[in-house]
Image: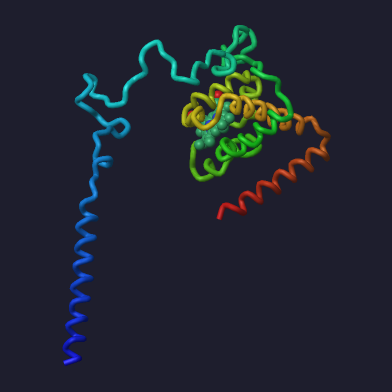
Amino acid sequence: MQRLAKRRKARTTKAMAFAFCLFTFAFLTACRQDMHDQPKYRPLRPTEFFDDGRSSRPFVEGTVARGHLDEDDLLYRGRSDQSAATAGATGQGFADVFPFPVTRQVVDRGEERYNIYCSVCHDKSGAGLGMIVRRGYRQPPSFHIERLKTAPAGYFFDVITNGFGAMPDYSAQITAQDRWAIVAYIRALQKTEQNIEELNESDREKVKAAKAEGQKKTEGHEK
Ligand code: HEC
């Protein structure tokens, strides 16, 4: 008799647990998806709402997005009134001056940004043999060729801002100020390379040996 009562009790507990599960489940499925399913456009999705079929709207003509006035021609485009007179063979029309004084701090900042964004292709010395190039990307010219040594600063700024041939632009990743800092650092790199040529024979050999050593170390990381 007692055994029967126990069994019956166990059965009701089970039934209750089942009912509880069913109950919670019913509530779970009742969650509504209104926010999730609201009408919206993913970037660049087509639409029938606008006549031109595009859901992304172009800027209203004659307006400027907040924070993008960019009036300063030298700071944002590497050009100035005297550009034409100072330009070398490459980069005609670009300014060969900086929009702000080049201090030690600026060059240090440029070195840091250069090593992050450019050295992967142009390598740390600017010779154009970065890791991505060694893995098969198109090889850029060395910064130490005559044409780029005489190219105005504004031209380098323009290449970073708008890209050049196979090289993508870095305007979204690097602010205008930092792009100029990188240009200042490239100028420092060009000067250093030039100075190596001006050293006496034995010092030049020492620098070259140190460079070769550095190169070997980088190659060690390739595998
Ligand atoms: C993904 C690799 C890559 C990165 C990163 C890169 N470059 Fe380049 N760069 C190239 C290639 C490739 C060329 C040559 C393009 C061509 O001739 O089509 C080039 C060319 C150049 C030139 C020479 C243009 C000329 O007149 O010949 C300059 C200057 C330059 N890059 C600066 C930079 C600076 C500064 C950065 C960092 C902000 C940078 N690049 C980052 C690949 C890169």
Residue at the (27%, 33%) spot, across then down: 40
Q: Which of the two residues, 34 or 19, is positioned nearer the viewer here?
A: 19
Residue 90 percent coordinates (x, y): 58, 18
Vertical side of 6 occupied by 69: above or below: above
Q: Quadrant of ligand 1?
A: top right
Residue 128 percent coordinates (x, y): 59, 36
Please identify the quarter of the rendering in which residue 94 is found. top right
From this viewpoint, which residue is outermost toward the bottom? 1
Vertical side of 31 occupied by 107: above or below: above
Vertical side of 209 occupied by 54: above or below: above
Residue at the (49%, 29%) spot, across then down: 172
Residue at the (51%, 45%) spot, across then down: 135
Q: Which of the two residues, 39 or 132, is positioned nearer the viewer here?
A: 39
Residue 200 percent coordinates (x, y): 83, 34
Q: Which of the two residues, 41 or 92, is positioned nearer the viewer here?
A: 41
Q: Which quadrant is home to the C terminus?
A: bottom right
Q: Which quadrant is home to the N terminus?
A: bottom left
Q: Is residue 100 visible?
A: yes
Q: Which of the two residues, 69 or 5, is positioned nearer the viewer here?
A: 5
Residue at the (62%, 38%) spot, across then down: 115
Judging from the image, the colouring scheme is rainbow
Residue 11 percent coordinates (x, y): 18, 79
Q: Is residue 90 visible?
A: no
Please identify the quarter of the rendering in which residue 127 is found. top right
Count of picture labels: 0
